[in-house]
Image (spheres, rainbow, N blue to C red):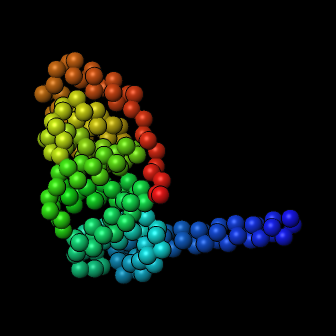
Amino acid sequence: MRKFVIIKSFLLTLLFCVGGGAWASFQAGEDAYLREDYETALSEWRPLAEQGNAEAQNMLGYMYRYGQGVTQDFDLARQWYRRAADLGNSMAQNNLGALYRQGLGVPQDYQEAFRWFLRAAEQGDGGAQNHVGLMYYKGEGVEKDLVQAYMWAHLAAQQGVDPSIQALDFLAQEMTPAQMEEAIERAGKWKPKGEEVAL
C-alpha cells in the first residue's frame, strides 16, 4: 500500500511540474507576443499546441489568421482553431465561427458560423455572444429574431463588448416594449453552460 501511495504521489508531482512548465511556456509565449516578438511566441506555443494545449492552438490559429510571424494562411488558421475548438476552447470556437462567417479559407457558411458562435456564447464568451446577437439580427444562419438578438447583445454588453453596447440602442428602435421586456427577462434568466469538456 505504501508503495502505491509513493508512486501516486510521484505521478501527481510529475503532472504538476509538467503542467506548471506548460503554463510557464505559454506565459513566455504570451509575453513575447505582446512584445511583437512573434518568432519567440511561435517557438514557445508550437510545441504546446502540438501536445494538445487548446490555448496555444488558438493562438497559432490567430497568428496564421493575421500573418503574425508567419505567412498569412487561412487554412492553417482554420486547422489550429478547429483543434482547439474541438477541445472546447470558446475563443477558438468564436474565431472559427468568424472564418466561416467571412468565408476565409473556407466557403462562406452562415449556419456553420452560427453553430460555432453559439457553442462559445453558451460558455459565456462575450465576443461570441455579440456574434450570435448580430446573426439573429441579420438572420444569418438562423431565422431573424429581434428578441434573441437583443438578449445576446445584452449579455455581451454586460461584459463590456463595445459593438453590443452600441447595438442595444439601435435594436431598441426596432422593437416593441413587449419584445424589449421579454429580451431583458430572458437575459436575466440566462446562465452559461460552463466550459465544454473534450471527449
**Image position of 11 (left or right of 24):** right
Q: In which quarter of the image is residue 75?
A: bottom left
Q: In which quarter of the image is residue 159?
A: top left
Q: Is residue 14 positioned above or below 94 on the image?
A: below
**Image position of 84 (left or right of 115):** right
Quadrant for the N terminus, please.
bottom right
User: Depth check: 64 or 27 in front?
Assistant: 64
Inspect this view and state whether residue 161 appears.
no
User: Depth check: 5 or 149 in front?
Assistant: 5
**Image position of 162 (left or right of 83):** left
Q: Residue at point 34% right, 74% down?
A: 36
Numbered-mark total: 0
Residue 129 coordinates in the image, percent (x, y): 30, 43
User: Depth check: 144 or 30 in front?
Assistant: 144
Q: In which quarter of the image is residue 23?
A: bottom right
**Image position of 110 (left or right of 77):** left
Q: Residue at point 38% right, 60% down?
A: 86
Q: Residue at point 16% right, 37% down?
A: 143
Q: Is residue 59 positioned above or below 153 on the image?
A: below
Residue 130 coordinates in the image, percent (x, y): 27, 44
Residue 47 coordinates in the image, percent (x, y): 46, 78
Q: Is residue 194 positioned above or below 29 on the image?
A: above
Farthest-out residue, top: 178
Residue 62 coordinates in the image, percent (x, y): 31, 67
Inspect this view and state whether residue 147 appears.
yes
Q: Residue at point 29% right, 58% down?
A: 95
